[in-house]
């Protein structure tokens, strides 16, 4: 029997993100030599990579980088996914996410295609992810990328499980004065997940559909015909309060709205992005 201990198995799992049986087989084959076992895991991982193409990658993390720019600040946010939370909390996966983030930010990439094509080491971000996925024995996917610019960009990362990396990330762009309220707004966005910044940002077809639904519901409830226009607009306003950031009651003080909270600083919101792993 190869000369290794349970502690050796644990250490190798932490270094590679590979499963327990894979680690034990590699240590057996390497006669307990950790470095040789890692090489074996990498080689077998490369052979298995194609088989994992259809596997679900519902776990992951969100990472953010904010830097100063000529016109203010620019922020890059990435969501990197894997198959299991065991790999996601592994230091190698976290290091990979940070390397990917740096490469994407350096390339100025604002969409997935350009992010995957960004230079990373001797190849591209896509090459790096494929190689590391083979090493860790799981399918790893760069799911999405966002790039936000503004006079000020505030970021917020939130953990939904204390033993895992952040799974919710928010970027909020404001003018100089609005930065004073940006952290409150970012935390609010993380919790309440608005879809639009203002009512003007809601697509016309979405407004029309919500108005139609409100009318049909009101008719089904037996509301009088003469009162329908007012009732429908009231229900439409309810939709806006749920979906539009500036109309939502502020999470930390529901007596005011997000829009009024920011306006009190003399500033203005310019945009936001929210990522939640898997959604």
Image (tube, rainbow, N blue to C red):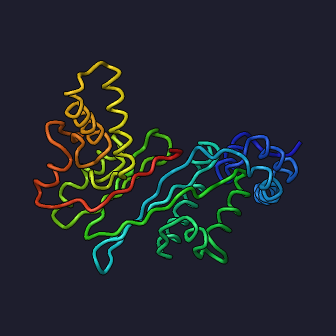
The image position of residue 248, as x and y in percent, is 24, 42
**Residue 1 in view, yes or no:** yes
Image position of 128 (left or right of 163): right
Q: Is residue 33 visible?
A: no
The part of the image, by quadrant, that contains residue 55 is top right
The residue at the point 28 percent across, 74 percent down is 72
Q: Residue at x 30, y 51 (%)?
A: 186
Furthest residue to the front?
A: 225
| Residue that sits furthest to the top in the current view | 222
- Residue 7 in picture, x, y percent from top left: 69, 42
Q: Residue at x 75, y 50 (%)?
A: 52
Q: Is residue 162 or residue 4 the one in the foreground? A: 162
Picture quadrant where residue 193 is located: top left
Is 105 situated above or below 47?
A: below
Residue at 66% x, 77% y: name it: 122
Task: Report the side of 124 relative to 64 (left or right).
Answer: right
Q: How many marks?
A: 0
Judging depth in this view, the residue of 79 and 196 nearest the camera is 196
**Residue 59 falls in which quadrant of the image?**
top right
Residue 190, percent from left and from top: 35, 45
Asked if 176 appears above or below 263 in the picture, the reply is below
Quadrant location of the N terminus in the rendered image: top right
Task: Say left or right for 45 vs 172.
Answer: right
Foreground residue among 243 and 212: 212
| 5 to 104, vertically: above or below | above
């Amino acid at each position: 029997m190869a000369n290794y201990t349970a502690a050796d198995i644990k250490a190798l799992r932490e270094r590679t993100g590979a499963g327990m049986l894979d680690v034990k087989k590699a240590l057996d084959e390497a006669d307990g030599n950790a470095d040789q076992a890692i090489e074996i895991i990498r080689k077998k991982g490369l052979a298995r990579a194609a088989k994992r193409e259809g596997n679900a990658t519902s776990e992951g993390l969100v990472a953010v980088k904010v830097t100063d720019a000529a016109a203010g600040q620019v922020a890059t946010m990435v969501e990197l996914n894997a198959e299991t939370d065991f790999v996601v909390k592994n230091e190698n996966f976290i290091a990979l996410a940070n390397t990917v983030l740096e490469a994407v930010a350096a390339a100025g990439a604002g969409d997935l295609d350009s992010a995957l094509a960004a230079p990373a080491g001797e190849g591209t971000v896509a090459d790096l992810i494929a190689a590391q996925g083979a090493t860790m024995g799981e399918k790893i996917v760069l799911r999405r990328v966002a790039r936000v610019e503004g006079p000020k960009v505030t970021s917020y990362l939130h953990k939904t499980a204390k033993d895992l990396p952040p799974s919710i990330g928010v970027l909020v762009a404001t003018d100089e004065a609005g930065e004073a309220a940006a952290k409150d707004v970012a935390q609010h966005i993380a919790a309440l997940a608005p879809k639009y910044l203002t009512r003007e940002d809601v697509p016309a077809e979405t407004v029309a559909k919500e108005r139609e639904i409100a009318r049909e519901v009101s008719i089904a409830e037996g509301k009088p015909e003469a009162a329908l226009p007012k009732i429908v607009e009231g229900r439409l306003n309810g939709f806006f309060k749920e979906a539009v950031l500036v109309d939502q009651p502020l999470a930390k003080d529901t007596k005011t709205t997000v829009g009024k909270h920011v306006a009190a600083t003399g500033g203005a919101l310019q945009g936001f992005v929210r990522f939640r792993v898997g959604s």
